[in-house]
Image: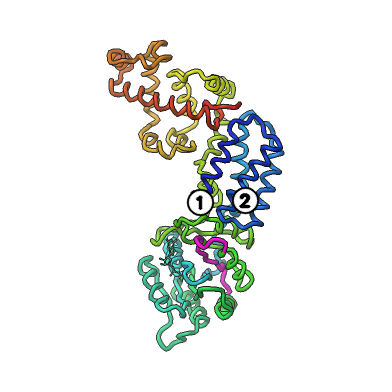
């Protein structure tokens, strides 16, 4: 999900990379491209319009920052606006002051309610709660049995109608479940309700009746994110019918375009609270708007990096290095060392490098780097002659042996550093033509 949108947005930002400053026409062109990207991802039109207006307004108002180039500023704006349409803050479950907290699930058949009930139960149990699952979907054949299987897997008991006792009356089952929860000291009740293939007045009335008779603390609307624009219409119908407090997006593991996820919060005014990403019980998590925005932008945590960089880097040194690279001078081992030192000041190196965009592929290499390695790297570089540092290609076998001896390391370590340096040099060259990061060589042309 979101792959196409990610690709499109990334290319919008790449087109901006060489701008020194954003003109009105740059802003309009960028806004147009973002608009197309969102529409292609199936985001609802009113949501796209609002999004674009906000981005344009903020892009016009940006200061010419010493620390961020225009591409980075636009990334930041788009990121902020994505978080905003996804709901801003993470919305947690509101637990009742007196147990049990009642959570009711509503949604169309096939949305993933029963599966979700099991996931939610497992998650709540892990959070230290004692949930009770309640089977109120008495319409779909096997729904009760399916919930029992879920309950078993989650290790959570299921309350279901006994044959002959209220069979066919989900309202009575729901009411009895609350009495049972109090008796058996369950602090949360999760009510799975019946869905239909489409919006249906009888189904909606049943949901309304269950809601009125159990007074849930949270009514969660469960929706299949794969269904695209229809999800928005269904959400609206449920909002007007039974009403709900939060949304659960299911099947986020699918390859749909993801527009539903981006529209639903704005259209219904209700936060997305959970995301379901597979058929297994553990494919489930609290929905975090900021993390989802980060995933869509595929920027890793570049914004965090930018902020940390602003705080930690020596602006002048950084500018000098950026200027040097932009002018086409070679990235030397001295620069490499200096950069490593700057990065070292910023915290565990693995975390930091992982924040750089495009670093996904380099993950393996990054994972091999250890903070303590830095001291050895520094020792190796310091054992080289100035000529070797400037022109590392000259470091042949006998020079490697001398350097290893001088730095108290092995020839293998010296070779591995030289290889790593050449890789970094290649990357720096690529980045000099890409989006600069303050303090890291790049361009601010
Ligand atoms: P209900 O009718 O709303 O109760 O829907 P179900 O819970 O029975 O789910 C319908 C189908 O979707 C089942 O085959 C589930 O295994 C599947 N499903 C549910 N959630 C997810 C999910 O997050 N990802 C994927 N890939 N499949 C899911």
Within the image, what quadrant is residue 270 found in?
bottom right
- In the image, 416 versus 229, the foreground residue is 229
Spot occupied by residue 225 in the image (x, y as percentages of width and height)? 51, 60
Question: Within 10 angstroms of label 2, few (less than 14), some, or many (20 or more) residues?
Answer: some
What residue is disc 2 on? 84
Q: Is residue 225 inside the magenta stretch?
A: yes
Judge whether residue 344 can be spotted in this image: no
In the picture, the disc for residue 307 is none
- Camera-side residue: 41 or 177? 41
Q: Position of residue 282 (x, y in %)?
A: 40, 58
Quadrant of residue 376 within the rendered picture? top left
The answer to whether any part of residue 441 appears in the image is yes
Q: Mark 1 = which residue?
A: 2
Q: Secondary structure at mark 2?
A: helix
Q: Is mark 2 within 8 Å of ligand 1?
A: no
Q: Residue at x 41, y 38 (%)?
A: 361
Q: Is residue 299 magenta?
A: no
Displayed quadrant of residue 71: top right
161 above or below 106?
below
Ligand 1 resides in the quarter of the picture at: bottom left
Secondary structure state at the residue bearing disc 1 = loop
Against 302, residue 38 (above or below) is below
Q: Is residue 333 left or right of residue 241?
A: left
Residue 28: image location, x then y, percent: 68, 42
User: Please, is residue 314 above or below residue 28 in the view?
Assistant: above
Q: Which segment did they paint magenta? A: 215-229
Expressed as whole percent of the image width and height from the top left, the position of residue 96 reads 56, 67
């Amino acid at each position: 999900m979101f792959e196409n949108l990610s690709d499109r947005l990334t290319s919008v930002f790449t087109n901006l990379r060489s701008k020194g400053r954003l003109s009105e026409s740059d802003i309009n062109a960028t806004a147009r491209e973002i608009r197309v990207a969102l529409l292609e991802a199936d985001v609802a039109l009113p949501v796209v319009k609002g999004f674009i207006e906000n981005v344009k307004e903020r892009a016009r108002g940006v200061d010419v920052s010493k620390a961020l180039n225009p591409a980075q500023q636009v990334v930041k704006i788009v990121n902020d606006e994505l978080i905003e349409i996804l709901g801003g803050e993470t919305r947690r479950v509101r637990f009742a002051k007196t147990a049990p907290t009642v959570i009711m699930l509503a949604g169309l058949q096939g949305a993933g309610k029963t599966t979700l009930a099991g996931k939610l139960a497992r998650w709540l149990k892990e959070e230290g709660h004692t949930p009770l699952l309640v089977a109120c979907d008495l319409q779909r054949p096997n729904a009760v049995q399916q919930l029992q299987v879920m309950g078993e897997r989650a290790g959570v008991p299921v309350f279901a109608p006994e044959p002959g006792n209220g069979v066919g009356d989900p309202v009575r089952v729901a009411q009895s479940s609350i009495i049972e929860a109090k008796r058996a000291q369950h602090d949360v009740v999760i009510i799975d309700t019946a869905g239909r293939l489409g919006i249906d007045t009888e189904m909606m009335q049943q949901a309304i009746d269950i809601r009125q008779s159990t007074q849930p603390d949270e009514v969660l609307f469960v929706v299949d994110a794969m269904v695209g624009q229809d999800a928005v219409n269904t959400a609206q119908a449920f909002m007007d019918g039974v009403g709900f407090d939060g949304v659960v997006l299911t099947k986020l593991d699918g390859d749909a375009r993801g527009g539903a996820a981006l529209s639903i919060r704005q259209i219904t005014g209700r936060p997305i609270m959970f995301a379901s990403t597979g058929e297994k019980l553990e494919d489930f998590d609290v929905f975090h708007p900021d993390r989802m925005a980060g995933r869509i932008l595929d920027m890793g945590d570049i914004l965090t990096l930018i902020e940390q960089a602003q705080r930690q880097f020596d602006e002048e040194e950084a500018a000098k290095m950026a200027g040097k690279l932009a002018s086409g001078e070679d990235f030397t081992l001295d620069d490499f060392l200096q950069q490593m030192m700057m990065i070292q000041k910023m915290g565990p190196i693995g975390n930091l490098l992982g924040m750089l965009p495009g670093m996904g592929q380099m993950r393996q290499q990054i994972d091999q780097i250890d903070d303590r390695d830095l001291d050895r790297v520094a020792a190796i570089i310091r054992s080289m002659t100035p000529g070797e540092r400037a022109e590392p290609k000259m470091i042949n076998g006998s020079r490697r042996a001398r350097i290893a001896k001088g730095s108290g390391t092995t020839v293998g370590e010296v070779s591995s550093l030289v290889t790593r340096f050449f890789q970094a040099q290649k990357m720096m060259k690529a980045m000099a033509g890409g989006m600069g990061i303050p303090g890291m060589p790049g361009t601010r042309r």
